[in-house]
Amino acid sequence: MGRLLMSGTVDAECLMVDFAGLRLRNPVLAASGTFGYGLEMQSYVDLEKIGGFVAKSLTLEPRYGNSPPRIAEVSSGMLNSISLENVGVEAFIRQKLPEVPQEALVIASVFGTEIAHYVEACERLSSEDRVAAIEINASCPHVKSGGIEFGQNAQILGKLVGQVRSSTVGTLLVKLSPNVTDIAEMARVCEAEGADGISVINALQALDVDLKERRSVLWNGLGGLSGPAILPVALRMVWQCFQAVSIPICGIGGISSAEDALKFILCGAQAIQVGTANYLNPCSTEAIVGGLLDYCQENRVGSIQDLVGCLQPPRWKVS
Ligand SMILES: Cc1cc2nc3c(=O)[nH]c(=O)nc-3n(C[C@H](O)[C@H](O)[C@H](O)COP(=O)(O)O)c2cc1C
């Protein structure tokens, strides 16, 4: 808990948060897929100063991504269809993890095309001391259901979370897909099946067109929209999840400043993740930590946790 000092200011402890069984030095994490395996970002960010990072999503076996173009800039954001290229679970454990500074908090991210793949990858990763938590990425096509995302069907999502939960020791987070009608229903399923927390949201399915070629700008056709364009959608979803469940929420979507992060916290996020902003400014996460500390000091907020879910009712309710 941050202390209100004699001088009337608060110290850096005001940013400490308890999140899903983890003690974070601050609520600012880097989002999966935008921070590599942490090592790539060390020359820009002091990994011991941010709350932690979620590593690139891992599969059991190494995987190549889509062909280029697989990233495109759009108004207020970017489209990507990297298709979850990664080194695989074993290479992550043997080659990447040992190189990460001891004080950095590492969250591993896992995905698969079948539930059994998630289960095996999570089992393997949860036995590693350096892995503080596992985030399962539910925005992947479930092959047995014809390619619908795990996170788009409450029954499939429930089965996935339940089976991973029963074979995973330690903190389990579920990253929800925003490509659904009722995000609160998905949050409830995760809570019922034993998730310790949810991460809200992944990129939104989207398309942009190259007029000269009259085809999608991306090789793959559709891509995931991220960046400032999705911030209001993400805030809405975090707020709806906050109304629906008691497990903690990590807010994600278009965050590039401390002000953005504070909006998520007011809407119910106990921690936040920074994604696309890392491409514009690789030091974003550390800068946001600094901005949050300034805010707490200027507003004499003893603990940032006191702000979680403090969004005031809309004007029509009070007038
Ligand atoms: C290039 C790129 C790669 C991504 N790869 C992953 C990934 O491997 N796993 C995952 O769960 N999310 C992945 N994401 C989604 C982000 O973690 C994040 O949820 C999303 O981009 C929204 O946050 P933002 O607007 O701050 O970027 C990726 C996003 C981008 C832009």
Image: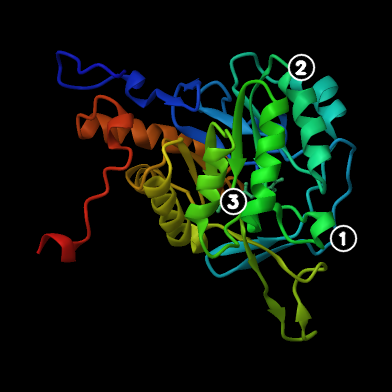
Q: Quadrant of the C terminus?
A: bottom left
* SS class, disc 1: loop
* Mark sitting on residue 291: none
Residue 284 at least partly seen: no
* Mark sitting on residue 67: 1
The earlier-in-sequence mark between 2 and 3 is 2
Label 3: which residue? Answer: 276
Using the image as rendered, state which of residue 33 and residue 152 is in the foreground: 152
Report whether the residue tagged 3 is closer than 8 Å to ligand 1: yes
Query: How far is mark 1 from mark 3, CA to CA?
Result: 20 Å
User: Contact, CB < 8 Å: mark 1 with mark 2?
Assistant: no
What is the crowding at mark 1: few (fewer than 14 residues within 10 Å), some, or many (at least 20)? few
* SS class, disc 3: loop
Expressed as whole percent of the image width and height from the top left, the position of residue 222 reads 73, 69
Name the residue: 85% across, 52% down: 65
Expressed as whole percent of the image width and height from the top left, the position of residue 205 reads 65, 65
Using the image as rendered, state which of residue 43 and residue 117 is in the foreground: 117
Report whether the residue tagged 2 is closer than 8 Å to ligand 1: no
